[in-house]
Image (spheres, rainbow, N blue to C red):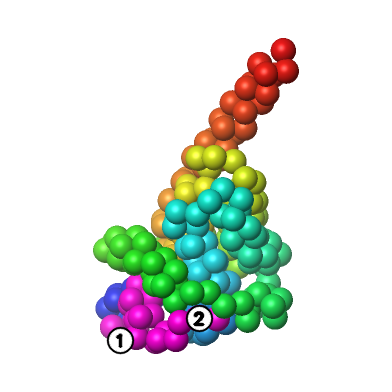
């Protein structure tokens, strides 16, 4: 939650992520511990954590595998599930500490920029019905991330991060911004897919 006058002592999401270097000192970090460090913030915090690694340069194919857990979260959002469920093998999966911290370094500036103007508003967006609608859209965006197409990975990740941050900060305007970025991601995906189809036709001719 942002440092709004109603919540003066509550750390922001960026504050919590910035504390990760002090929290995680072992060479390996479990996903369940990362989620615990963000506190009881529901599906949105899980979506933030699982979308953020896509900001790092990752070989095509591997980056799409990394995107799969986000699909599990967004489908639960779409169905209105109140608590997060992830398979135990995923919760206990370990990641190199340096990769976790590298992801944090990419994520923190985005969160800080959001927090400059963030405030609780447009409550309909983060109402129960609103979150379901947003969840359906986020599910579609997360599916795009899974397809191994070039030039189509970062925009979906930024879209999901904005949506997650907006829900965490109760700012419907940020959520809408994430939806708009997601629409741009869909456009890029369709464009890349259409280009590959045309190349395939040309090769086959």
List the residue tagged with mark 1: 9
List the residue tagged with mark 2: 29
Quarter holding the N terminus? bottom left
Left or right of 7 in this view: 147:
right
Q: Magenta part of the protein: which range?
A: 8-30
What whole-number distance in Å separates the C-alpha atoms at marks 1 and 2? 28 Å
Q: Does 111 sit above or below residue 11?
A: above
Pair 1/2: label in front: 2
| Cβ–Cβ under 8 Å for marks 1 and 2 | no
Question: For this rendering, which residue is in front, 90 or 114?
Answer: 90
Residue at image x 44%, y 69%? 99
Quarter holding the C terminus? top right
Q: Residue 169: where, in percent of width, then height?
A: 41, 70
Observer able to see residue 13: no
Q: Residue 160: where, in percent of width, then height?
A: 51, 57
Question: For this rendering, which residue is in front, 163 or 110?
Answer: 110
Observer able to see residue 73: yes
- Which residue in the rendered view is the most extreme toward the top? 205
Label 1 environment density (alpha carbons within 10 Å; few <14, some 14–19, many ≥20): few
Question: For this rendering, which residue is in front, 105 or 48?
Answer: 105
């Amino acid at each position: 939650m942002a440092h709004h006058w109603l919540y003066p002592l509550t750390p922001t999401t960026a504050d919590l992520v910035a504390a990760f270097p002090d929290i995680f000192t072992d060479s390996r970090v479990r996903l369940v511990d990362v989620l615990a460090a963000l506190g009881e913030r529901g599906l949105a915090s899980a979506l933030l954590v699982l979308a953020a690694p896509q900001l790092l340069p990752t070989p095509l194919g591997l980056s799409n595998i990394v995107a799969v857990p986000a699909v599990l979260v967004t489908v639960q959002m779409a169905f209105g599930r109140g608590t997060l469920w992830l398979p135990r093998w995923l919760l206990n999966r370990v990641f190199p500490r340096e990769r976790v911290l590298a992801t944090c370094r990419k994520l923190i500036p985005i969160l800080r920029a959001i927090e400059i103007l963030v405030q609780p508003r447009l409550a309909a967006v983060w109402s129960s019905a609103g979150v379901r609608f947003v969840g359906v859209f986020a599910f579609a965006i997360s599916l795009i991330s899974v397809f191994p197409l070039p030039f189509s990975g970062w925009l979906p990740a930024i879209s999901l991060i904005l949506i997650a941050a907006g829900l965490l900060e109760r700012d419907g305007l940020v959520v809408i911004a994430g939806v708009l970025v997601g629409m741009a991601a869909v456009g890029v995906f369709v464009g890349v897919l259409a280009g590959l189809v045309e190349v395939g036709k040309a090769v086959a001719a």
